[in-house]
Image (cartoon, coloured by chain):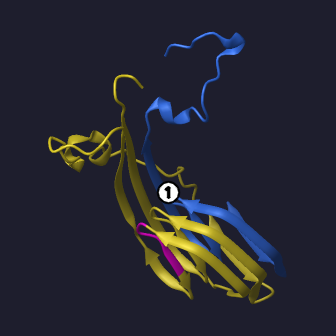
Amino acid sequence: MKKRISRVRKVTIATISYSSFFEVGDASAFQPKTNAIAVQKSGRPHSTDKGFPFERYSIFSEEVQVKGLPLTPFSYSSNHHQPFIDVNQVQVLGVSSSSLYQIGSLNRIEAESRIKHIRILSPQQ
Amino acid sequence: MKLEVHNWDLQVGDVQITGVSSSSLFLIGDMEEANLVSYYDTPPDSYIAGSLVPLGGGTFQR
């Protein structure tokens, strides 16, 4: 497939974090993965505090089959009558957790993020 | 099935985005295939925004 040229006059990004990317230009494939455990615990840290290994939580090992839509055989043709995609200005506050912001063309992206939140509250809460 | 796409002039003004997060994509360009997967596990507590205010001045017990 023929790709167009993307032209952006001005870009502002505040933050990029956790397996994320800002790409200017063309790319073939992007395959980021994030595993995260976010723990909020009330009270002070204690010497008996144990870590939080990923193996303990099934969310990080479960394989859920993501099936695409059944493909109907078809012929596809795209005709670009103008070789450019023009954008004046883009402002992004954050790009996070296996995400991508790209100016340019891409063949394939396979992104995955698994995030578990844990809250440990003291009894009076 | 025969799909024929004609891309004419594409011009965009200003774009403002707060966040692109958890296997998301913001692309200015052409692409062939996207496969974006996100698993999220959060306790119900985190869906409560702000504090609970008891009506009528009574005490509220969780």
Q: Position of residue B34 (x, y in %)?
A: 53, 64
Residue in the foreground of this view, choosing between B20 and A1? B20
| Residue A16 appears left or right of A77 | left
Q: Residue at x 74, y 81 (%)?
A: A79
Quadrant location of the N terminus of chain A?
Answer: bottom right
Vertical side of A30 occupied by B38: above or below: above
Q: Which region shows up in magenta?
A: A18-22
Chain letter behind tag 1:
B
Residue A24 at x, y percent in the picture? 57, 86
For the question of whether residue B8 can be seen, the reply is no
x 76%, y 80%: residue: A89
- Residue at the disc numbered 1: B22
Q: Secondary structure at mark 1?
A: loop
Q: Residue at x 74, y 68 (%)?
A: B16
Q: Is residue A21 magenta?
A: yes
How packed mark 1 is, by other alpha carbons closer than 10 Å (few <14, some 14-19, many 20 or more), is: many
Asked if B41 appears above or below B51 in the picture, the reply is below
In the rendered picture, chain B carries what hue? blue
Between residues B26 and A69, which one lies in front from this camera angle?
B26
Hue of chain A?
Answer: yellow
Amino acid type, label 1: Ser
Split into 4 quadrants, where in the image is the C terminus of chain A?
top left
Give the x, y percent position of residue A65.
38, 46
Q: Residue furthest front?
A: B57
